[in-house]
Image (cartoon, grey):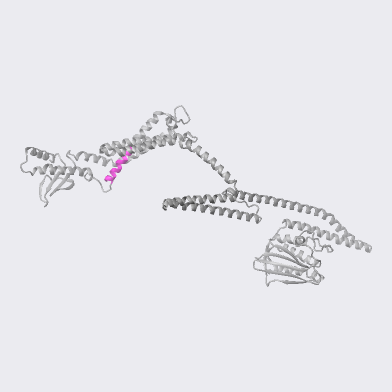
Amino acid sequence: MKMKNSLIAKTTAFILFIVMLITAAALAYCIVDMAQAGYYDITGYSFYDTPACYSITEDYANSAFYGYYMRKIKPNPSAQELAIIKEFEAQFSPSKSNFSFTVLDENNKELYTNFTSESFGMQNTFRFGDYVVNAFVRSPITAQDNYFQPYKTFNWFYRMRYALIAFAAFAGIAAIVMIIFLLNASGHRKGQDEIVLNVLDKIPLDLYVFGVAVLAYGLLNININVWFTLSAYQQYFFQGALGIAALLLALALLLTLSTRLKAGGRWWQNTVLYRVLVPVCRGLRTGGRALLTLFGNLPLIWKTAVGFIVYLFINALWLVACYKTYGHPIPVLILFLYNIVMLAGVCYIALILQRLKKGGEVIASGDYSHKIDTSRLYWDFKTHAVTLNNISSGMTAAVEERLKSERFKTELITNVSHDIKTPLTSIVNYVDLLKKEPAASENAKEYLEVLDRQSARLKKLIEDLVEASKASTGNIPVNAGKTDIVELINQSAGEYAERFAQTGLEAVIKAPQGSVFIFADGRLLWRVFDNLLNNICKYSMPNTRIYLDIGDDEKRVTVTLKNISRYPLNISTDELLERFVRGDSARTTEGSGLGLSIAKSLTELQNGSFDLSVDGDLFKVIISFNCL
């Protein structure tokens, strides 16, 4: 923590960063150059393979041929030329030179040589007109001529070639460590815990970046304009100076970014762009909201018309642009993409309408818990979806309220029926006891029979009432399974055969051969047919036929019961299905008016349908189930 606040530590780290980065860059450049030259070749590399050795040899070959040999073969050379010849002979002597040569004519005839039998590391041939100079370089280099210093330098670099890689890696890692320390220490001041911004850190960030970019561009221009005017030696120093300057610019930018980020807050607010764009965006947002509000208050037909007019206007503009540019591909492409986007928008609207349609259908089918997803809906579509969801919620509440009312009604009927059945049971029991007493008068016997009959009727009425309430509210357990409807109809008709005979009714059963299966509760379905056949016995005209038809169309199984009514049926089928309503409006029979209501409720509990049909005196009940 103390080092981060120390100016000396920061300065030292900065200097080390510069030095290490320059060192790493220089060594990396050197390593790349050496690798390209062949220092790291597996096959080996020697001084004699270097361009420096070839260049020195070429210079010596030129001097040996033009400076020495051509003067030597010149007839009657001057005293000055003789002196020069002697200087060259001394220069190319074995003790002072590692270079030796042989001059050949065009027929490869040796004309001159100072080559000895010493071993050589390189041999090259140079052509000068009709002459050929074979140049030889001694191995090893011993004489201190132009080869000597490059030879020593090469050997040093060759020995250090792998060590240079390690030095470059160390310098690079050290530079990275220093920059990490500088970035970590930026903004810290001695004696202060919070981050402190300096003068440069308070400059708007985009203005700061722009200034750095301008300076970097200036450095690039200087490099381009000055580079070619410098010598090779000067170019190295010039490039190094420009590199250091660029490095300082990059480091300054990194340090100010680090300080601003660590200072927290909305650092992006300290930019010229932010200060300019915020008021503009606010104005555009306000104007956009006003336009959206105005557009939103328009009727849907006007919204559609305005949208279509805007679409046509933009299309017309781009068509004019295509015409003015003589079919240039860019306006044509933009026009094409614009229409593709509009098509996508129309498809999106179609999908929204499809979603609303399906949601409405689901709600209309009775699934009031269904909610339309409004997450990606906008404008009037979202309003319509919310309205449908509210309708669903309202219907759900109404259904729940109705179910609650039905439940209370059922509980009331059950409780009242229980309260009635208790004294009724006592009456029935006491009537039985009275019947067992010694014989009374004929009138007393008649009264007992009336009491017995009416108490039994009242007991049956209460039982039917409780069953009707349970059936209408779904409080009866349904154990549905595979049920043979043909067998059940035959059994039911068999159970009522005696009563049919008593009333002169003839049962005509029309059913398919074999079995017809439905998915129903046999116990409840027997109760349905029991009620219906009981009604037939009570209300059918004597000495008539009743028809029990079973139809199977491979999708639905339909059971139709038809009979001729004993009484005029001047009442609608809906009223007949209500409780306590009987076809015998004079109520001369002992029915309770609950049989049809119970049968309908029990059928619907098993996912069947129950319908009535009245045609004059013909009474018809139609029950249908899905086939198995």
Q: Give the image location of residue 623, x and y in percent.
A: 71, 65
Q: How many marks?
A: 0
Which residue lies most toward the right here?
A: 441
Residue 428: name its quadrant.
Answer: bottom right
Residue at x-position 27% and y-position 36%: 234
Out of 260 and 434, give the one closest to the viewer: 260
Q: Examine the rendering and report whether any part of residue 485 can be seen.
A: yes
Q: Give the image location of residue 168, x and y in percent.
A: 33, 39
Name the side, left or right, on which 599 lies relative to 313: right
The magenta region covers 23-40
Where is the N terminus found, in terms of image quarters? Answer: top left
Q: Examine the rendering and report whether any part of residue 250 can be seen.
A: no
Out of 489 and 98, give the one closest to the viewer: 489
Q: Give the image location of residue 101, x and y in percent.
A: 14, 45
Name the side, left or right, on which 580 lies relative to 281: right
Check the image and report above or below for 193 versus 433.
above
Name the side, left or right, on which 363 lies relative to 64: right
Is 543 contained in the magenta span? no
Q: Give the image location of residue 452, x and y in percent.
A: 87, 61
Check the image and report above or below for 227 versus 541.
above
Magenta stretch secondary structure, dominant: helix
Where is the C terminus found, in terms of image quarters? Answer: bottom right
Name the side, left or right, on which 81 lies relative to 603: left
Is 27 contained in the magenta span? yes
Check the image and report above or below for 495 versus 365.
below
